[in-house]
Image (spheres, rainbow, N blue to C red):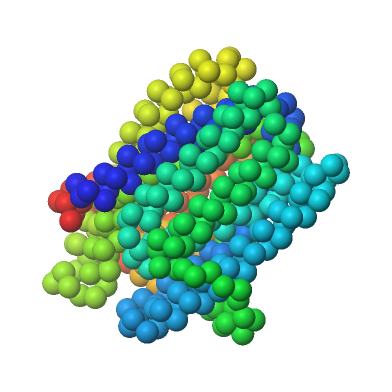
Amino acid sequence: MSRDVAIIFGLKVLAVGLNALGLAALASASSVAAFGAFAALFSAGMLISIPAMAGLNLSLVRHTSGAGPGRLALARHGLGRLAGGLAAAGVLGGVVLLLAMREAAAGPLAALLFGLTYGFSEVLQSTARAFDGPVRAFVWREIAWRAAFFLTALAAALAGGLPAPAMLGLLTLALLLVTALQARLSALWPLRAPRVAEAGRLWRHAPGFMGVSLLSTAAQHLVVLLAGVTLSLEAAAYFFAALKVVQILSLSVVAVNFVLTTHLRDFRKGKTGETDTKTLTAICATAAWGNLLFWGAGMAALLVFGRLILSLFGAAYESGGVYLAILGVAAGLNAGTGPAGFVLVMFDRQRQFNLVSALAASGGAGLCLLLGGAFGLVGFCWGYVCWIGLQNTGAAWMAWRTLGINPTALARPDWRLLRR
């Protein structure tokens, strides 16, 4: 296994503990109702920022694939300008937040600003990887972001609880600094204010993807919002906390995909010497099984950190364990079949991937709420499991149909691919 894979996997396991402890500290620093409100508003911020930046991200990747140094530098320059504008907006929002600190709207404004900043930072990180940025940039960004979240939330808990706007303001400031560090390390520096013409050319490249991404992200975060309305704020709080940890576990598969992406690029360029789909099938099989194994190791680490959480913050957080276990199944489904969507995009099957995502997103929120109304929060979480399974299994089926992959051959991974 390559050194890069080991570094990223180790950091992701550590991130599980830091994020879980940070969420527990945040929950103990204020009431469950306040945490539920934070979850809903955080989701609103993510809803605004991630789809838009994801569309830009895809646009840059597609239009710089195989491009020369000059075109790549131009794309980096354009992203740097756009990122600078978003960062400036975040700073301006922070000033407004300070002025409104004594007002009742300070809490919602803080959560929304934090969500926007978080979403921007997440997508900037993935964009840097798309440009083959150094692993060192990814490593430092992971360390800085998780540490900022954990230490700020833990300090709030140990100090008896800071006001929610103040705590989120500190997190937002720390995240802006981390974002600047990420941009600097991944050659996206300097960040400048965007020009309207430059931004317009970038946005026009991926309208279809942005629309589907918006629909999918809206449906997923609408589930968190509606959990607080139809069930309780406590339900929203527990579901949100578990969802964040599940997402971290699912993201740990980036360690496998990090290596396999190179193989896929070589396959597309004809460097493998294969005339059939044997090599492609081996790559997909290794991705699926490798992701499942990495997810299993991450969940085992979570169980160890879970005992530490309960010992530090008491049994009040323990009732969320059953929901976390159910959502863990969703993470397993996502890890096992998620690479299919990744492969579809790599081979310019964006239209098929969009179709699967749109169908799953349109029915996913309704399925969660239907089961939630009938069986409470446990049914609500199982609805989310069904949603993830529907989306990723559909993507896998579409990959087999459009790329000619033999489903039975997916049971035979080639672990030698990970040695690269």
- In the rendered image, which quarter contains the C terminus? bottom left
In this rendering, would 231 be left or right of 186? right
**In the displayed structure, would residue 259 be above or below residue 313?**
below
> Residue 106: image x %, image y %?
79, 45
**In the displayed structure, would residue 178 be above or below residue 29?**
below
Residue 140 seen by the camera: yes
* Rendered residue at 62%/59% (across/down): 49
> In this view of the protein, which residue sits in the foreground, 52 or 402?
52
* Rendered residue at 41%/79% (across/down): 73
> Residue 236: image x %, image y %?
68, 35
In this rendering, would 14 be left or right of 27? left
Residue 250 seen by the camera: no
> In this view of the protein, which residue sits in the foreground, 66 or 295?
66
> Residue 74: image x %, image y %?
45, 81
> Residue 65: image x %, image y %?
36, 76
* Rendered residue at 71%/53% (across/down): 94
Q: How many marks?
A: 0
> In this view of the protein, which residue sits in the foreground, 305 or 295?
305
Q: Which image quadrant is residue 265 in? A: bottom left
* Rendered residue at 27%/57% (across/down): 260
**In the displayed structure, would residue 34 be above or below residue 367?**
above
Query: Among all residues in the image, which is located at the extreme right?
Result: 103
Q: Which image quadrant is residue 342 in? A: bottom left
